[in-house]
Every structure is written in structure tokens, then in C-alpha cells.
Image: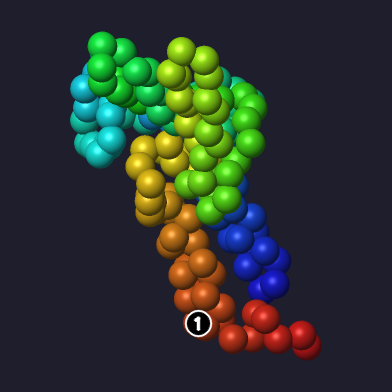
Amino acid sequence: MNTALFVFVAIGTAFFVLDTGFAIKCFVCNSFHQADCADWFDNVTQHLVNCPQGTQKCRKVVQEVWLDDHWDVRYIRQCALNGTVGERHGRVCQERYGSYNVRMRYCHCDNQDGCNSAPAVLSTSGFGMILPFLVTLIAALMPNVLVQR
């Protein structure tokens, strides 16, 4: 019986890994061309993009330029090969100030698909939520499986 439980958990884990994939999915857009890319971000109008293989992070860039007596703000969301993930899973961003009144804020995250959408994202894989429940259910239905004989 221990073998059956091990096989079940191994297959469930394989499905979970295949479901989440090996590369992260990120939102990819630019508010210069797409107004719905700006904050407050509406992830219903934008779709997750499969990032290239090996990409492990998403990036959100807020670019502010003083132009014609006002701040012109653009939001860029993209896949990222590198970058430092800030505190609180990337919710704390790095800021850079340049010459000619340019400000940039870079936010990198790698904790879940679509993490570059908004300040607080709560989404997980449906199968990833149900897998622990199924393992617990099977263990409860077959109490002798976990007991050493």
C-alpha cells in the first residue's frame, strides 16, 4: 500500500510541475500603446504570455519623465531574465533617478505567474490547491498506509 501512495503523490507532483511549467508566465504590455496596461492594472483585459524557456522573473517598470510641465508616466510589463527581486516578493521596487528629470522604478518578481500585474496578487494553480487535499483525503481513508508494520 505504501507503494500505491508513493505512486499517487509522484503522479500528482508531475502534473503540478507540468501545469505550472518550467518558465514563468508574465503580463507583457506597454501603457504607451495600451492604456489598460497602466495602474490600476486590469488583468482581465491583458493576457498572460508564456515567457521564453529559462526565464524565471517578471518585471514591471514605471517610467516617469518631466515633459512640458507635467510628469509623463508609462508602465511597461515584461518577462525578465535577470533582476533583483525586492522585499515582499517583489512588491518593494528599486528606484533610479537620471538626468533630465527621469525617474524609473523597477519591480521584479518570481513567486507566481502574472506577479507583475498589481501590488497584491493572490492566485495559485487550481491543481496545486487541490493536491494537498487529495493526499490528506487518501491518507484519511487508508489509515494503515502511513503506519509501519
Residue furthest right in the image: 149
Q: Which is more toward the observer, 133 or 45?
A: 45
78 to the left or right of 13: left
Q: Residue at x 28, y 27 (%)?
A: 37
Whole-percent x, y for residue 139 in the image: 56, 78
55 to the left or right of 69: right
> Which residue is the site of mark 1?
141
- Indicate the secondary structure of the residue bearing disc 1: helix
Q: Residue at x 29, y 19 (%)?
A: 72
Whole-percent x, y for residue 127 in the image: 44, 54
Q: Residue at x 22, y 27 (%)?
A: 36
| Count of marks, rendered view | 1
Type of residue at label 1? Answer: Leu
Q: Which is more toward the observer, 68 or 20?
A: 68
75 to the left or right of 57: left
Say whether residue 76 is visible: no
Q: Residue at x 52, y 15 (%)?
A: 99
Q: Which is more toward the observer, 53 or 38?
A: 38
131 to the left or right of 126: right
> Quarter holding the C terminus?
bottom right
Asked if 124 appears above or below 70 in the picture, the reply is below
> Quarter holding the N terminus?
bottom right
Asked if 30 appears above or below 40 in the picture, the reply is above
